[in-house]
Amino acid sequence: MRPPDPSAGDPTPWPRRDAKPEGTPWAALIALMVLAAVLRTIGLDGGLWLDEIHTLLDSVRQPLLQIVTVFPGNNQHTFYSVLAHVSIRVLGEEAWSLRLPALLFGVATPPVLYLFAREFVGRSEALLASLLLTVSYHHVWFSQNARGYTALAFLALLSSWLLLRGLRRASTSDFVWYGVASALGVYTHLTMVFMVIAHAIACAFLLGVPGRDKDALARWRRPVTGFALAAVFTLALYAPLLLDVQQFFLRRPNPNEIATPAWAAKELLRGLQIGVGTALGVPACGVLFVWGLRSFFRQSRFLLALFVLPGVITVAAAVALARPIFPRFLFFLAGFGVLILVRGALEIGAWLTLRLRPGEPAAPVTALGAALVAALALLSAASLPFAYRYPKQDFDGAARFLLAHRADREPVVTAGGAMYAYRDYYRQPWVGVTSLEQLQDIRSQGRRVWVIYTLPGYIEMRAPDLMKTLRDQCRVAGVFRGTVAEGDVTVCVVPPASDDPGSRAPGPPRQ
Protein backbone atom coordinates (compact mmCIF):
# COMPACT_ATOMS: atom_id res chain seq x y z
CA MET A 1 0.00 0.00 0.00
CA ARG A 2 1.95 3.02 -1.29
CA PRO A 3 1.11 6.72 -1.46
CA PRO A 4 -0.22 7.47 -4.93
CA ASP A 5 1.61 9.65 -7.39
CA PRO A 6 0.55 13.28 -6.71
CA SER A 7 0.28 13.77 -10.44
CA ALA A 8 -2.73 11.47 -10.34
CA GLY A 9 -4.67 14.31 -8.71
CA ASP A 10 -5.24 12.80 -5.23
CA PRO A 11 -2.44 13.56 -2.74
CA THR A 12 -4.17 11.52 -0.01
CA PRO A 13 -2.20 8.35 0.84
CA TRP A 14 -5.39 6.32 1.38
CA PRO A 15 -8.67 6.06 -0.51
CA ARG A 16 -11.21 8.64 0.58
CA ARG A 17 -14.95 7.97 0.71
CA ASP A 18 -17.29 10.73 -0.42
CA ALA A 19 -14.79 13.32 0.74
CA LYS A 20 -15.50 16.06 -1.75
CA PRO A 21 -14.60 19.56 -0.57
CA GLU A 22 -17.25 20.71 1.91
CA GLY A 23 -17.22 23.50 4.45
CA THR A 24 -16.95 22.67 8.14
CA PRO A 25 -20.46 22.74 9.71
CA TRP A 26 -19.49 24.83 12.71
CA ALA A 27 -23.08 25.41 13.79
CA ALA A 28 -23.75 21.67 13.92
CA LEU A 29 -20.51 20.99 15.81
CA ILE A 30 -21.24 23.72 18.34
CA ALA A 31 -24.76 22.32 18.81
CA LEU A 32 -23.27 18.86 19.45
CA MET A 33 -20.87 20.31 22.00
CA VAL A 34 -23.73 22.07 23.78
CA LEU A 35 -25.74 18.84 23.81
CA ALA A 36 -22.69 16.93 25.05
CA ALA A 37 -22.20 19.45 27.86
CA VAL A 38 -25.84 19.21 28.95
CA LEU A 39 -25.90 15.41 28.95
CA ARG A 40 -22.63 15.23 30.88
CA THR A 41 -23.56 17.86 33.46
CA ILE A 42 -26.72 16.10 34.70
CA GLY A 43 -25.79 14.22 37.86
CA LEU A 44 -22.15 15.35 37.73
CA ASP A 45 -22.14 15.98 41.48
CA GLY A 46 -23.21 12.44 42.45
CA GLY A 47 -21.31 10.43 45.02
CA LEU A 48 -17.80 9.22 44.23
CA TRP A 49 -17.06 5.57 43.56
CA LEU A 50 -14.10 3.59 44.85
CA ASP A 51 -11.60 4.37 42.08
CA GLU A 52 -12.45 8.07 42.23
CA ILE A 53 -11.90 8.00 45.99
CA HIS A 54 -8.50 6.38 45.43
CA THR A 55 -7.67 9.06 42.85
CA LEU A 56 -8.68 11.86 45.21
CA LEU A 57 -6.91 10.57 48.31
CA ASP A 58 -3.81 9.01 46.78
CA SER A 59 -3.10 11.70 44.23
CA VAL A 60 -5.31 14.74 43.65
CA ARG A 61 -5.25 15.98 47.26
CA GLN A 62 -1.48 15.66 47.42
CA PRO A 63 0.94 18.52 46.66
CA LEU A 64 1.53 19.01 42.94
CA LEU A 65 5.19 18.05 43.33
CA GLN A 66 4.18 14.69 44.78
CA ILE A 67 1.65 14.03 42.01
CA VAL A 68 4.32 14.39 39.31
CA THR A 69 7.05 12.49 41.18
CA VAL A 70 5.23 9.53 42.77
CA PHE A 71 3.52 6.65 40.94
CA PRO A 72 1.28 4.96 43.53
CA GLY A 73 0.06 2.30 41.07
CA ASN A 74 -1.94 1.54 37.99
CA ASN A 75 -4.82 3.61 39.38
CA GLN A 76 -2.73 6.73 38.79
CA HIS A 77 -3.61 8.83 35.74
CA THR A 78 -0.96 11.47 36.22
CA PHE A 79 -2.05 14.06 33.65
CA TYR A 80 -5.64 13.84 34.88
CA SER A 81 -4.52 14.13 38.51
CA VAL A 82 -2.62 17.32 37.71
CA LEU A 83 -5.69 18.86 36.03
CA ALA A 84 -8.04 17.72 38.81
CA HIS A 85 -5.65 19.08 41.44
CA VAL A 86 -5.81 22.51 39.79
CA SER A 87 -9.60 22.23 39.46
CA ILE A 88 -10.28 21.54 43.13
CA ARG A 89 -7.76 24.16 44.22
CA VAL A 90 -9.51 26.82 42.15
CA LEU A 91 -13.14 25.71 42.55
CA GLY A 92 -13.09 23.91 45.90
CA GLU A 93 -13.24 20.19 46.55
CA GLU A 94 -16.56 18.91 45.26
CA ALA A 95 -17.46 15.83 43.27
CA TRP A 96 -18.25 17.99 40.22
CA SER A 97 -14.96 19.91 40.38
CA LEU A 98 -13.01 16.66 40.72
CA ARG A 99 -14.77 15.38 37.59
CA LEU A 100 -14.64 18.65 35.66
CA PRO A 101 -11.56 17.76 33.53
CA ALA A 102 -13.24 14.49 32.48
CA LEU A 103 -16.36 16.41 31.47
CA LEU A 104 -14.39 18.97 29.44
CA PHE A 105 -12.52 16.29 27.53
CA GLY A 106 -15.82 14.50 26.98
CA VAL A 107 -17.40 17.63 25.51
CA ALA A 108 -14.38 18.27 23.27
CA THR A 109 -14.21 14.74 21.83
CA PRO A 110 -17.16 14.75 19.35
CA PRO A 111 -15.74 17.63 17.27
CA VAL A 112 -12.30 16.00 17.24
CA LEU A 113 -13.93 12.78 16.07
CA TYR A 114 -15.49 14.81 13.24
CA LEU A 115 -12.11 16.26 12.22
CA PHE A 116 -10.49 12.83 12.28
CA ALA A 117 -13.31 11.21 10.30
CA ARG A 118 -13.26 13.95 7.65
CA GLU A 119 -9.82 12.75 6.62
CA PHE A 120 -11.43 9.72 4.99
CA VAL A 121 -15.25 10.12 4.90
CA GLY A 122 -17.77 12.74 3.87
CA ARG A 123 -19.35 15.37 6.08
CA SER A 124 -22.61 13.54 6.69
CA GLU A 125 -20.95 10.34 7.87
CA ALA A 126 -18.56 12.27 10.12
CA LEU A 127 -21.46 14.23 11.67
CA LEU A 128 -23.48 11.06 12.28
CA ALA A 129 -20.51 9.51 14.08
CA SER A 130 -20.08 12.63 16.22
CA LEU A 131 -23.79 12.57 17.08
CA LEU A 132 -23.66 8.94 18.17
CA LEU A 133 -20.63 9.61 20.37
CA THR A 134 -22.35 12.66 21.87
CA VAL A 135 -25.29 10.62 23.16
CA SER A 136 -23.30 7.46 23.91
CA TYR A 137 -24.19 6.08 27.35
CA HIS A 138 -20.63 4.96 27.98
CA HIS A 139 -19.07 8.22 26.86
CA VAL A 140 -21.43 10.17 29.12
CA TRP A 141 -20.64 7.78 32.00
CA PHE A 142 -16.88 8.19 31.64
CA SER A 143 -17.25 11.96 31.21
CA GLN A 144 -18.63 11.96 34.76
CA ASN A 145 -15.84 9.75 36.10
CA ALA A 146 -12.89 11.46 37.80
CA ARG A 147 -10.36 9.40 35.88
CA GLY A 148 -8.36 10.01 32.73
CA TYR A 149 -10.35 7.86 30.31
CA THR A 150 -12.08 10.67 28.39
CA ALA A 151 -8.77 12.53 28.19
CA LEU A 152 -7.24 9.37 26.75
CA ALA A 153 -10.08 8.96 24.21
CA PHE A 154 -9.69 12.62 23.19
CA LEU A 155 -5.92 12.38 22.81
CA ALA A 156 -6.17 9.08 20.92
CA LEU A 157 -8.40 10.73 18.32
CA LEU A 158 -6.36 13.94 18.26
CA SER A 159 -3.07 12.10 17.72
CA SER A 160 -4.65 9.90 15.03
CA TRP A 161 -6.02 12.98 13.26
CA LEU A 162 -2.61 14.68 13.39
CA LEU A 163 -1.00 11.52 12.02
CA LEU A 164 -3.38 11.38 9.06
CA ARG A 165 -3.14 15.10 8.40
CA GLY A 166 0.65 14.99 8.59
CA LEU A 167 0.78 12.11 6.12
CA ARG A 168 -1.65 13.84 3.78
CA ARG A 169 0.01 17.26 3.89
CA ALA A 170 3.62 16.06 4.38
CA SER A 171 3.69 18.57 7.24
CA THR A 172 6.41 18.54 9.89
CA SER A 173 4.34 20.75 12.22
CA ASP A 174 1.54 18.16 12.31
CA PHE A 175 4.01 15.52 13.45
CA VAL A 176 5.44 17.83 16.11
CA TRP A 177 1.94 18.25 17.53
CA TYR A 178 1.45 14.51 17.13
CA GLY A 179 4.41 14.00 19.46
CA VAL A 180 2.89 16.36 22.03
CA ALA A 181 -0.58 14.77 21.92
CA SER A 182 0.81 11.23 22.11
CA ALA A 183 3.06 12.06 25.06
CA LEU A 184 0.17 13.64 26.98
CA GLY A 185 -1.85 10.50 26.25
CA VAL A 186 0.87 8.28 27.69
CA TYR A 187 1.14 10.65 30.65
CA THR A 188 -2.56 10.09 31.20
CA HIS A 189 -2.34 6.30 31.02
CA LEU A 190 0.40 3.94 29.89
CA THR A 191 -1.91 2.07 27.52
CA MET A 192 -1.47 4.98 25.09
CA VAL A 193 1.97 3.51 24.38
CA PHE A 194 0.22 0.71 22.52
CA MET A 195 -1.59 3.20 20.29
CA VAL A 196 1.71 4.83 19.29
CA ILE A 197 3.15 1.39 18.56
CA ALA A 198 0.07 0.57 16.47
CA HIS A 199 0.51 3.84 14.55
CA ALA A 200 4.11 2.95 13.76
CA ILE A 201 3.14 -0.53 12.55
CA ALA A 202 0.33 0.88 10.40
CA CYS A 203 2.74 3.41 8.90
CA ALA A 204 5.11 0.57 8.04
CA PHE A 205 2.34 -0.97 5.92
CA LEU A 206 1.66 2.36 4.26
CA LEU A 207 5.16 3.78 3.82
CA GLY A 208 7.22 0.63 3.47
CA VAL A 209 10.07 -0.67 5.62
CA PRO A 210 13.40 1.15 5.28
CA GLY A 211 16.03 -1.24 3.92
CA ARG A 212 13.52 -3.26 1.94
CA ASP A 213 12.22 -0.29 -0.02
CA LYS A 214 14.78 2.20 -1.31
CA ASP A 215 12.27 5.08 -1.21
CA ALA A 216 10.84 4.25 2.23
CA LEU A 217 13.45 6.20 4.16
CA ALA A 218 12.44 9.45 2.49
CA ARG A 219 8.76 8.78 3.19
CA TRP A 220 9.54 8.08 6.87
CA ARG A 221 11.44 11.33 7.49
CA ARG A 222 8.52 13.32 8.91
CA PRO A 223 6.65 10.47 10.66
CA VAL A 224 9.86 9.49 12.45
CA THR A 225 10.01 13.04 13.80
CA GLY A 226 6.56 12.56 15.36
CA PHE A 227 7.36 9.16 16.88
CA ALA A 228 10.72 10.33 18.19
CA LEU A 229 9.20 13.43 19.77
CA ALA A 230 6.47 11.31 21.35
CA ALA A 231 9.19 9.15 22.95
CA VAL A 232 11.29 12.13 24.08
CA PHE A 233 8.36 14.05 25.55
CA THR A 234 7.05 10.92 27.30
CA LEU A 235 10.44 10.20 28.87
CA ALA A 236 10.70 13.82 30.00
CA LEU A 237 7.27 13.68 31.65
CA TYR A 238 7.91 10.30 33.28
CA ALA A 239 11.52 10.98 34.30
CA PRO A 240 10.60 11.70 37.95
CA LEU A 241 8.40 8.57 38.00
CA LEU A 242 10.53 6.05 36.14
CA LEU A 243 11.78 4.16 39.19
CA ASP A 244 8.27 3.85 40.64
CA VAL A 245 6.87 2.72 37.28
CA GLN A 246 9.64 0.16 36.91
CA GLN A 247 8.99 -1.23 40.39
CA PHE A 248 5.27 -1.46 39.65
CA PHE A 249 5.78 -3.57 36.54
CA LEU A 250 8.43 -5.75 38.18
CA ARG A 251 5.99 -6.58 40.98
CA ARG A 252 4.39 -9.96 40.48
CA PRO A 253 0.67 -9.66 39.72
CA ASN A 254 -1.89 -11.37 41.93
CA PRO A 255 -2.44 -14.84 40.40
CA ASN A 256 -6.07 -14.75 41.57
CA GLU A 257 -6.87 -11.36 40.06
CA ILE A 258 -10.55 -11.21 39.20
CA ALA A 259 -10.00 -9.18 36.01
CA THR A 260 -9.19 -12.11 33.74
CA PRO A 261 -9.74 -12.01 29.96
CA ALA A 262 -12.90 -14.13 30.35
CA TRP A 263 -14.24 -11.82 33.06
CA ALA A 264 -13.39 -8.75 30.94
CA ALA A 265 -15.26 -10.20 27.95
CA LYS A 266 -18.30 -10.90 30.12
CA GLU A 267 -18.25 -7.39 31.59
CA LEU A 268 -17.82 -5.88 28.15
CA LEU A 269 -20.98 -7.61 26.93
CA ARG A 270 -22.84 -6.54 30.07
CA GLY A 271 -21.77 -2.94 29.55
CA LEU A 272 -22.76 -3.00 25.89
CA GLN A 273 -26.20 -4.29 26.85
CA ILE A 274 -26.68 -1.35 29.22
CA GLY A 275 -25.53 1.05 26.50
CA VAL A 276 -28.12 -0.12 23.97
CA GLY A 277 -30.81 -0.80 26.54
CA THR A 278 -31.64 -4.35 25.44
CA ALA A 279 -29.98 -7.74 25.10
CA LEU A 280 -31.11 -7.93 21.47
CA GLY A 281 -29.21 -4.73 20.76
CA VAL A 282 -25.84 -6.39 21.44
CA PRO A 283 -25.95 -8.94 18.57
CA ALA A 284 -27.49 -6.27 16.31
CA CYS A 285 -24.57 -3.95 17.05
CA GLY A 286 -22.26 -6.90 16.49
CA VAL A 287 -23.64 -7.30 12.96
CA LEU A 288 -23.19 -3.58 12.30
CA PHE A 289 -19.66 -3.70 13.69
CA VAL A 290 -18.62 -6.62 11.48
CA TRP A 291 -20.19 -4.98 8.44
CA GLY A 292 -18.35 -1.77 9.25
CA LEU A 293 -15.04 -3.59 9.60
CA ARG A 294 -15.63 -5.19 6.22
CA SER A 295 -16.29 -1.81 4.63
CA PHE A 296 -13.17 -0.20 6.08
CA PHE A 297 -11.13 -3.24 5.02
CA ARG A 298 -12.25 -2.58 1.47
CA GLN A 299 -11.61 1.14 1.71
CA SER A 300 -8.15 1.05 3.30
CA ARG A 301 -6.31 -1.58 5.30
CA PHE A 302 -4.18 1.22 6.68
CA LEU A 303 -7.23 2.90 8.23
CA LEU A 304 -8.51 -0.41 9.56
CA ALA A 305 -5.12 -1.00 11.19
CA LEU A 306 -5.40 2.39 12.92
CA PHE A 307 -8.77 1.33 14.34
CA VAL A 308 -8.03 -2.26 15.33
CA LEU A 309 -4.33 -2.64 16.11
CA PRO A 310 -4.30 -0.53 19.32
CA GLY A 311 -6.90 -2.76 20.95
CA VAL A 312 -5.26 -5.97 19.80
CA ILE A 313 -1.85 -4.88 21.08
CA THR A 314 -3.30 -3.64 24.39
CA VAL A 315 -5.04 -6.94 25.14
CA ALA A 316 -2.05 -9.00 23.96
CA ALA A 317 0.33 -7.02 26.17
CA ALA A 318 -1.92 -7.40 29.22
CA VAL A 319 -2.13 -11.16 28.67
CA ALA A 320 1.61 -11.48 28.06
CA LEU A 321 2.43 -9.51 31.21
CA ALA A 322 -0.23 -11.41 33.21
CA ARG A 323 -1.85 -8.10 34.13
CA PRO A 324 -5.55 -7.60 34.92
CA ILE A 325 -7.79 -6.63 32.00
CA PHE A 326 -10.67 -4.25 32.52
CA PRO A 327 -13.03 -3.25 29.68
CA ARG A 328 -12.35 0.40 30.51
CA PHE A 329 -8.75 -0.10 29.34
CA LEU A 330 -10.19 -0.14 25.80
CA PHE A 331 -12.37 2.93 26.23
CA PHE A 332 -9.77 5.09 24.50
CA LEU A 333 -10.91 3.36 21.30
CA ALA A 334 -14.51 4.56 21.72
CA GLY A 335 -14.31 6.99 18.82
CA PHE A 336 -13.02 4.33 16.46
CA GLY A 337 -15.73 1.92 17.59
CA VAL A 338 -18.40 4.53 16.86
CA LEU A 339 -16.97 5.11 13.38
CA ILE A 340 -17.12 1.37 12.64
CA LEU A 341 -20.71 1.08 13.91
CA VAL A 342 -21.84 4.07 11.86
CA ARG A 343 -20.15 2.71 8.76
CA GLY A 344 -21.89 -0.65 9.27
CA ALA A 345 -25.28 1.05 9.63
CA LEU A 346 -24.70 3.15 6.51
CA GLU A 347 -23.55 0.14 4.49
CA ILE A 348 -26.60 -1.88 5.48
CA GLY A 349 -28.80 1.11 4.70
CA ALA A 350 -27.23 1.44 1.24
CA TRP A 351 -27.61 -2.31 0.65
CA LEU A 352 -31.30 -2.20 1.57
CA THR A 353 -31.85 0.89 -0.57
CA LEU A 354 -30.40 -0.81 -3.64
CA ARG A 355 -32.74 -3.75 -3.17
CA LEU A 356 -35.79 -1.60 -2.60
CA ARG A 357 -34.93 0.75 -5.47
CA PRO A 358 -32.68 -1.18 -7.88
CA GLY A 359 -32.21 1.68 -10.32
CA GLU A 360 -31.15 4.27 -7.73
CA PRO A 361 -27.45 5.26 -7.78
CA ALA A 362 -25.43 4.02 -4.82
CA ALA A 363 -24.62 6.68 -2.22
CA PRO A 364 -22.44 6.43 0.92
CA VAL A 365 -25.20 7.94 3.08
CA THR A 366 -28.80 6.98 2.37
CA ALA A 367 -31.98 7.85 4.22
CA LEU A 368 -32.20 4.26 5.51
CA GLY A 369 -28.60 4.31 6.69
CA ALA A 370 -29.05 7.61 8.48
CA ALA A 371 -32.24 6.25 10.07
CA LEU A 372 -30.31 3.24 11.41
CA VAL A 373 -27.71 5.53 12.97
CA ALA A 374 -30.50 7.67 14.43
CA ALA A 375 -32.05 4.52 15.94
CA LEU A 376 -28.69 3.65 17.56
CA ALA A 377 -28.47 7.18 18.95
CA LEU A 378 -31.99 6.97 20.38
CA LEU A 379 -31.30 3.61 22.01
CA SER A 380 -28.15 4.94 23.62
CA ALA A 381 -29.84 8.15 24.77
CA ALA A 382 -32.70 6.10 26.23
CA SER A 383 -30.17 4.33 28.47
CA LEU A 384 -28.94 7.57 30.03
CA PRO A 385 -31.66 7.79 32.74
CA PHE A 386 -30.07 4.72 34.35
CA ALA A 387 -26.81 6.65 34.72
CA TYR A 388 -28.65 9.68 36.07
CA ARG A 389 -30.90 7.75 38.45
CA TYR A 390 -28.10 6.02 40.37
CA PRO A 391 -24.66 7.19 41.48
CA LYS A 392 -21.67 5.13 40.44
CA GLN A 393 -21.58 3.74 43.99
CA ASP A 394 -23.99 4.90 46.69
CA PHE A 395 -21.72 4.95 49.73
CA ASP A 396 -23.56 8.02 51.04
CA GLY A 397 -27.02 6.45 50.90
CA ALA A 398 -25.85 3.20 52.48
CA ALA A 399 -24.16 5.01 55.37
CA ARG A 400 -27.21 7.20 56.06
CA PHE A 401 -29.49 4.17 56.03
CA LEU A 402 -27.25 2.21 58.38
CA LEU A 403 -26.89 5.04 60.88
CA ALA A 404 -30.66 5.58 60.87
CA HIS A 405 -31.51 1.91 61.59
CA ARG A 406 -28.63 0.70 63.72
CA ALA A 407 -29.32 0.41 67.46
CA ASP A 408 -26.96 1.99 69.96
CA ARG A 409 -23.69 0.10 70.51
CA GLU A 410 -24.34 -2.39 67.73
CA PRO A 411 -20.99 -2.92 65.96
CA VAL A 412 -20.53 -2.04 62.30
CA VAL A 413 -17.98 -3.70 60.03
CA THR A 414 -17.03 -3.08 56.42
CA ALA A 415 -15.80 -5.53 53.83
CA GLY A 416 -14.51 -5.44 50.27
CA GLY A 417 -14.25 -2.07 48.59
CA ALA A 418 -16.30 -0.47 51.37
CA MET A 419 -13.37 -0.77 53.78
CA TYR A 420 -11.18 1.85 52.14
CA ALA A 421 -14.05 4.19 51.29
CA TYR A 422 -15.50 4.40 54.80
CA ARG A 423 -12.19 4.30 56.66
CA ASP A 424 -10.12 6.79 54.66
CA TYR A 425 -12.68 9.01 52.89
CA TYR A 426 -15.73 9.08 55.17
CA ARG A 427 -13.61 8.70 58.32
CA GLN A 428 -16.05 6.31 59.97
CA PRO A 429 -14.73 4.38 62.99
CA TRP A 430 -15.96 1.09 61.57
CA VAL A 431 -13.80 -2.01 61.64
CA GLY A 432 -12.77 -3.51 58.32
CA VAL A 433 -12.80 -7.29 58.08
CA THR A 434 -10.84 -9.33 55.55
CA SER A 435 -11.47 -12.82 56.92
CA LEU A 436 -14.24 -14.89 58.46
CA GLU A 437 -12.26 -15.17 61.70
CA GLN A 438 -12.34 -11.40 62.18
CA LEU A 439 -16.08 -11.30 61.66
CA GLN A 440 -16.62 -14.21 64.08
CA ASP A 441 -14.57 -12.45 66.76
CA ILE A 442 -16.89 -9.45 66.55
CA ARG A 443 -19.99 -11.65 66.53
CA SER A 444 -18.77 -13.33 69.72
CA GLN A 445 -19.36 -10.07 71.61
CA GLY A 446 -23.03 -11.04 71.83
CA ARG A 447 -24.58 -8.34 69.67
CA ARG A 448 -25.88 -8.49 66.13
CA VAL A 449 -23.38 -7.02 63.67
CA TRP A 450 -24.13 -4.63 60.84
CA VAL A 451 -22.08 -5.28 57.72
CA ILE A 452 -21.65 -2.96 54.77
CA TYR A 453 -19.86 -4.23 51.69
CA THR A 454 -19.50 -3.85 47.93
CA LEU A 455 -17.70 -5.54 45.02
CA PRO A 456 -18.47 -9.06 46.28
CA GLY A 457 -16.36 -10.66 43.55
CA TYR A 458 -13.20 -9.37 45.21
CA ILE A 459 -14.31 -10.63 48.62
CA GLU A 460 -15.06 -14.02 47.03
CA MET A 461 -11.59 -14.12 45.50
CA ARG A 462 -9.68 -13.21 48.65
CA ALA A 463 -11.88 -14.70 51.40
CA PRO A 464 -14.44 -17.13 49.97
CA ASP A 465 -15.57 -18.35 53.40
CA LEU A 466 -16.29 -14.77 54.49
CA MET A 467 -18.39 -14.15 51.37
CA LYS A 468 -20.26 -17.41 51.88
CA THR A 469 -21.17 -16.36 55.42
CA LEU A 470 -22.34 -12.96 54.24
CA ARG A 471 -24.56 -14.61 51.64
CA ASP A 472 -25.93 -17.34 53.92
CA GLN A 473 -26.24 -15.68 57.32
CA CYS A 474 -26.24 -11.92 56.81
CA ARG A 475 -29.81 -10.65 56.53
CA VAL A 476 -29.97 -8.04 53.77
CA ALA A 477 -31.41 -4.80 55.11
CA GLY A 478 -30.84 -2.64 52.03
CA VAL A 479 -29.12 -2.70 48.65
CA PHE A 480 -28.08 0.65 47.26
CA ARG A 481 -27.81 0.57 43.51
CA GLY A 482 -24.83 1.85 41.55
CA THR A 483 -23.86 1.94 37.89
CA VAL A 484 -20.42 0.41 38.44
CA ALA A 485 -20.30 -3.32 37.70
CA GLU A 486 -20.94 -5.18 40.99
CA GLY A 487 -20.87 -1.74 42.61
CA ASP A 488 -24.11 -2.01 44.58
CA VAL A 489 -23.49 -1.26 48.25
CA THR A 490 -25.15 -3.85 50.49
CA VAL A 491 -26.11 -3.31 54.11
CA CYS A 492 -26.88 -6.50 56.03
CA VAL A 493 -27.16 -7.74 59.60
CA VAL A 494 -25.59 -10.91 60.95
CA PRO A 495 -26.80 -12.31 64.29
CA PRO A 496 -24.42 -12.80 67.23
CA ALA A 497 -22.55 -16.10 67.27
CA SER A 498 -24.68 -17.30 70.22
CA ASP A 499 -27.91 -17.01 68.17
CA ASP A 500 -29.42 -19.54 65.83
CA PRO A 501 -27.75 -18.94 62.43
CA GLY A 502 -31.19 -19.14 60.89
CA SER A 503 -32.42 -16.06 62.75
CA ARG A 504 -32.97 -13.00 60.63
CA ALA A 505 -33.14 -9.32 61.47
CA PRO A 506 -35.96 -7.37 59.82
CA GLY A 507 -35.09 -4.87 57.18
CA PRO A 508 -36.67 -2.63 54.58
CA PRO A 509 -36.85 -3.59 50.91
CA ARG A 510 -34.20 -3.06 48.26
CA GLN A 511 -33.35 0.61 47.71
Image (cartoon, grey):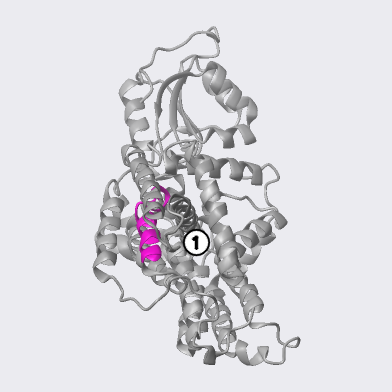
The front one of 400 and 34 is 34
SS for dot 1 = helix
> Does 422 sit above or below residue 363?
above
Residue range corresponding to the magenta coloring: 124-141
The amino acid marked with disc number 1 is: Phe
Q: Check the picture and name the quadrant holding the N terminus.
A: bottom right
Q: Is residue 140 magenta?
A: yes
The front one of 428 and 103 is 103
Q: Residue 274 location in percent, x, y?
A: 44, 40
The front one of 122 and 152 is 122
Q: Main secondary structure of the magenta part?
A: helix
Is residue 296 shown left or right of residue 78?
Answer: right
Is residue 295 shown left or right of residue 462?
Answer: left
Q: Residue 297 location in percent, x, y?
A: 60, 64
**Residue 243 seen by the camera:** yes
Q: Is residue 26 magenta?
A: no
Going 57% across and 53% down the picture, which residue do you hit?
A: 290
> Does 103 sit above or below residue 185?
above
| Residue under label 1 | 336
Q: How packed is label 1: few (under 14 Cα within 10 Å), some, or many (20 or more)?
A: many
Going 25% across and 60% down the picture, which residue do you hit?
A: 34
